[in-house]
Each structure stands twice: as C-alpha cells, then as structure tokens.
Amino acid sequence: AQSVSQHNHHVILSEAASLELGCNYSYGGTVNLFWYVQYPGQHLQLLLKYFSGDPLVKGIKGFEAEFIKSKFSFNLRKPSVQWSDTAEYFCAVRGGYQKVTFGTGTKLQVIP
Amino acid sequence: KAGVTQTPRYLIKTRGQQVTLSCSPISGHRSVSWYQQTPGQGLQFLFEYFSETQRNKGNFPGRFSGRQFSNSRSEMNVSTLELGDSALYLCASSTGDTDTQYFGPGTRLTVL
C-alpha cells in the first residue's frame, strides 16, 4: 500500500523568506508525484507533477520540487514567498493505477 | 473547456437521512474520483470510477456508494447519515491514465 507523509502541518513565514515543505512517500514501484495547492475559498489546483525524467520539476508561480528516489521524497521549494502564497499545500502520490493518496496538508501563512 | 462541476454546493441534512451528490467531469475525461475533506484529516479517498466501472475503493463503510454513467457523470450516495459525515466532498476528473486530476469546488455537507 502507498502512503504519504507531510512533516509540517503549519508553517508561518515572512514575505521573501525561502520555503521548503517536506513530503515523503512509501511505495515499492514507479510512482507519479504531485503537489496541489488550495488557496482560501478556491478549488484544489495542481502546482506541479513528476512522472519521469528530470527529477527537478518546475511548477506555477515559481514553485519547484525535487524527486529524490533514494529518500522517497518530493519536497516543495520556493526561494522567496509572497503573501499571496498563503494557502494549504498537499503532496500526493499515485503508484500505477492505484488510487491517488494525499498527505494531510501543510497550511502556509505568509506574513507581509 | 468547462471545469468540473458539482451539485449541490451546500447541503444540510439530519442524522439518518440519505444524500446524493453529483459530479460532472471535464468533457473528454473518463475517470472520476471522490474524496472527503475534513480539517486535520486532509483528503480521504472514497472511490474512483473509470468508464462506468469502479477502479479503486477507499476504506469507507458501505453507507458510501457511487456510480458513473455512460456520459462519465458520477454520483455518490451516503445513506443513514451520521454527524461525522459532515465534510467537504470533492470530485476530481482525469482522462483516465495516471495523470493529473482536476478538482471541482466541492459539496459542503452538514449533518445535524
């Protein structure tokens, strides 16, 4: 069975600070990895995804994530956060045609 | 393309009643997944349908059921509602391969 762990439940940063949100998964085979974001009052939307190839993937709004297979990790990063990045961030994994499993989410609050 | 639509957006029911939620996927998408979102629990997978067949199922009691129609629209039903069923129910559609899911706005169910 696959699982996802997000280490930080609530993160508070000042504008311009760097962000790294941890995500670890467990699954024995090939996986597809995702980060989704839910802005206040909005739908869940895709930030970025990894299927294969370059383990460093870039997404919308300056976000990027690095897939490290040996560590079963897919951490999300942004060099300089803005107040508009305040949202909840979800890491998700899908192994083969199994269900997509989501982490419990990390609430990011950016203080102007 | 129109996004994923869910109806109704809000529902208030009492314990013991049943409820049916509807989801219309993005045109051309053949896979529909349902999730229950609650504070602290994140997104819990309910089930996934692909071409009218249930492809994956989460760990929810039999009171939760779903189906998919030939036009890919999907419904989920919850019978004998309990207070703990109060949540945001999200529907997501995809083409059916192990690709990106697109989420609807959700149906907010309150059980009194």
Image (tube, rainbow, N blue to C red):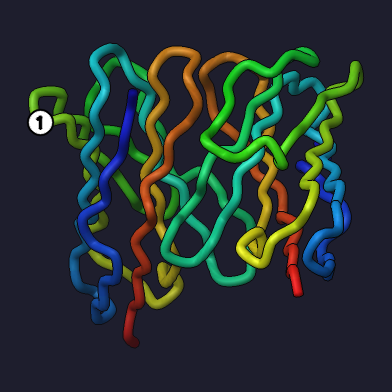
Q: For the image shown, how many numbered marks are present on the structure?
A: 1
Position in image of residue B58 (x %, y %): 54, 32
Q: Is residue B79 left or right of residue B92?
A: right
Chain on which label 1 sits: A
Where does label 1 land, which residue?
A71
As drawn, B81 above or below A5: below
Position in image of residue A70 (x %, y %): 8, 24
As drawn, B20 above or below A53: below
| Dot 1: element | helix
Q: What residue is shown at x 85% (from left), y 43% (from top)?
A: B22
Position in image of residue B48 (x %, y %): 64, 26
Q: Is residue A9 left or right of residue A68?
A: right
As drawn, A21 above or below B39: above
Question: What is the quadrant of the N terminus of chain A in the image?
Answer: top left
| Residue situated in front as seen by the camera: B34 or B24 | B34
| Extreme-left residue of the structure | A70
Q: Is residue A47 left or right of residue B62?
A: left
Position in image of residue A42 (x %, y %): 63, 63
Q: In this view, does B23 lie to the left or right of A71?
A: right
Q: How crowded is mark 1: few (under 14 residues within 10 Å), some or many (20 or more)?
A: few
Residue A21, quarter of picture: bottom left
Question: What is the quadrant of the C terminus of chain A in the image?
Answer: bottom left
As drawn, B49 above or below B78: above
Q: Which amino acid does label 1 sit on?
A: Lys
| Residue situated in front as seen by the camera: B87 or A10 | B87
Q: What residue is shown at x 59% (from left), y 33% (from top)?
A: B101
| Residue situated in front as seen by the camera: A4 or A68 | A4
Q: What residue is shown at x 42% (from left), y 64% (from top)?
A: B40
Q: What residue is shown at x 19% (from left), y 65% (from top)?
A: A18
Residue B23, quarter of picture: top right
